[in-house]
């Protein structure tokens, strides 16, 4: 313990981001009674630990808030979606050019989810396909879709149509699987 105490003091002095102040540590170091000095350091370390726990919880809450998909945009006062969803087929958007780019679309097909990608195929032959990003789904939905469609499954994907490096991509906001 005697060897670790100087190392802990030096570590705490070198970490002002954790709330360590030199004055607090010097105050504990100036106490002559070893028992009271150790008690002072224990109190300081406990407060430091609680402070870092609160900061970690705040960061976690902020990250969770950022991970949630934004609520759907509505027209002022109407409660209806700002852009209506366009029903499209995979074949209509698979060629790479679509006037629907940037709009919310709904497409049906065979969804295949692998470890690093998801694709929506027009049919089981796999000739026409669109890349699908599942990052906007909540964790529970993502896991359910990943498990159900690992070998391919029929699905309806709703999301914003964008362009990725390999062509058109749907940023999935909702994936509906048949029961």
Image: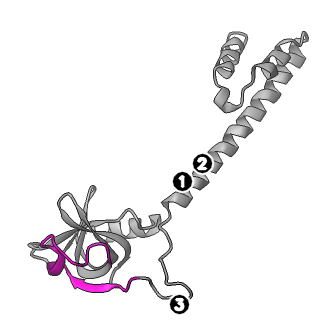
Determine the secondary structure under disc 3.
Answer: loop
Residue 36: mark in rendering: none
The quarter of the image holding the C terminus is bottom left
Answer yes or no: is residue 123 visible.
no
Residue 63: mark in rendering: 1
Determine the secondary structure under disc 2.
Answer: helix
- The location of residue 146, given as percent across then percent down, is 33, 66
Determine the secondary structure under disc 1.
Answer: helix
Marks 1,2: beta carbons within 8 A: yes
Question: Please, is residue 40 above or below residue 1 in the view?
Answer: below
Task: List the residue tagged with mark 2.
Answer: 59
- In the image, farthest residue toward the front: 76
Q: Which residues are magenta?
A: 83-103
Residue drawn at point x = 22 percent, y = 78 percent:
99
> In the image, which is nearer the foreground, mark 2 or mark 3?
3
Residue drawn at point x = 49 percent, y = 69 percent:
70
- The location of residue 36, given as percent across then percent down, is 90, 18
Residue 78: mark in rendering: 3
- What secondary structure prevails in the magenta region? loop
């Amino acid at each position: 313990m005697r060897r670790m105490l100087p190392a802990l003091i030096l570590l705490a002095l070198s970490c002002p981001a954790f709330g360590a102040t030199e004055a607090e540590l010097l105050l504990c170091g100036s106490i002559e009674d070893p028992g009271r000095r150790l008690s002072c350091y224990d109190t300081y370390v406990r407060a430091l630990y609680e402070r870092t726990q609160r900061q970690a919880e705040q960061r976690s809450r902020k990250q969770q808030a950022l991970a949630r998909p934004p609520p759907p945009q509505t027209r002022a006062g109407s409660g209806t979606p700002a852009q209506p969803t366009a029903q499209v087929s995979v074949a209509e958007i698979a060629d790479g050019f679509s006037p629907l780019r940037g709009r919310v679309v709904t497409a049906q097909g065979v969804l295949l989810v692998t470890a690093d990608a998801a694709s929506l195929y027009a049919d089981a032959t796999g000739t026409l396909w669109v890349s699908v990003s599942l990052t906007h789904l909540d964790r529970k939905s993502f896991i359910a879709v990943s498990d159900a469609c690992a070998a391919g499954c029929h699905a309806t994907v709703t999301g914003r149509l964008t362009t990725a490096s390999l062509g058109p991509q749907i940023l999935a906001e909702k994936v509906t699987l048949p029961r």
